[in-house]
Image: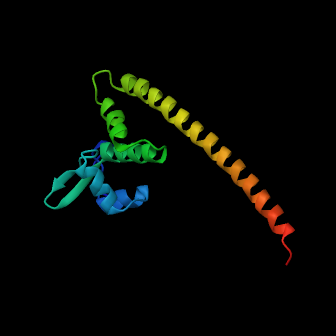
Amino acid sequence: MASRSEDEQTWTIREVAEEFGVTHRTVRHYEELGLITPERRGTTRVYRRRDRTRLGLILRGKRLGFPLDEIRTIIDLYDAPRGRRSQLEYVLGQIDERRADLEQRRRDLDDALTELARFEERCREDLSRIPR
């Protein structure tokens, strides 16, 4: 890790990938999509604090189930004139939508598990009536 001051600190693709538990290919994919923009020194990618922050936000968004286009919008809003406020307002709206989607999925899963339990019970009852 090269460092002059905290703001000028840089990381290699290997260090960034290891830190976030992703492959080099994943990091390069997000770069190809324009979600992160490391500096290039010849063929070497140089990541700065902003790239690491954006990568962390990308991965958090993915864990929460947001598609990459929504993640891009959220991250890009941070650089918008209203900055953090517009980002947070947008994110709160997306959180509400994501929560509603996940709650519906949970209800669907609960319904499916209940139905599966009933079916299992009927199968076991039928099986118990069949002589060995």
Q: Quadrant of the C terminus?
A: bottom right
Estimate the x, y position of residue 35 in percent, counting from the top left: 28, 44
Is residue 108 at all visible to an observer of this figure? yes
- Near-viewer residue (23 or 49): 23
- Near-viewer residue (88 or 124): 124
Vertical comparison of 10 with 90: above or below: below
Is residue 3 at all visible to an observer of this figure? no
Name the side, left or right, on which 103 lies relative to 123. Answer: left
- Near-viewer residue (91 or 18): 91
Estimate the x, y position of residue 91 in percent, counting from the top left: 43, 30
Estimate the x, y position of residue 105 in percent, counting from the top left: 57, 42
Name the side, left or right, on which 108 lies relative to 119. Answer: left
Q: Residue at x 39, y 43 (%)?
A: 67
Query: How does the figure colour the protein chain or chains?
Result: rainbow
Q: Residue at x 30, y 59 (%)?
A: 13
- Near-viewer residue (116 or 31): 116
Quarter of the rendering containing residue 76:
top left
Estimate the x, y position of residue 46 in percent, counting from the top left: 24, 54
Q: Residue at x 81, y 68 (%)?
A: 127
Residue furthest toward the bottom? 132
- How many numbered discs, if any? 0
Residue furthest toward the left? 42
Quarter of the rendering containing residue 44:
bottom left
Q: Quadrant of the N terminus?
A: bottom left
Name the side, left or right, on which 131 lies relative to 67. Answer: right
Vertical comparison of 77 with 24: above or below: above
Name the side, left or right, on which 116 lies relative to 79. Answer: right
Residue furthest toward the front? 130
Vertical comparison of 126 with 102: above or below: below
Q: Residue at x 75, y 52 (%)?
A: 118
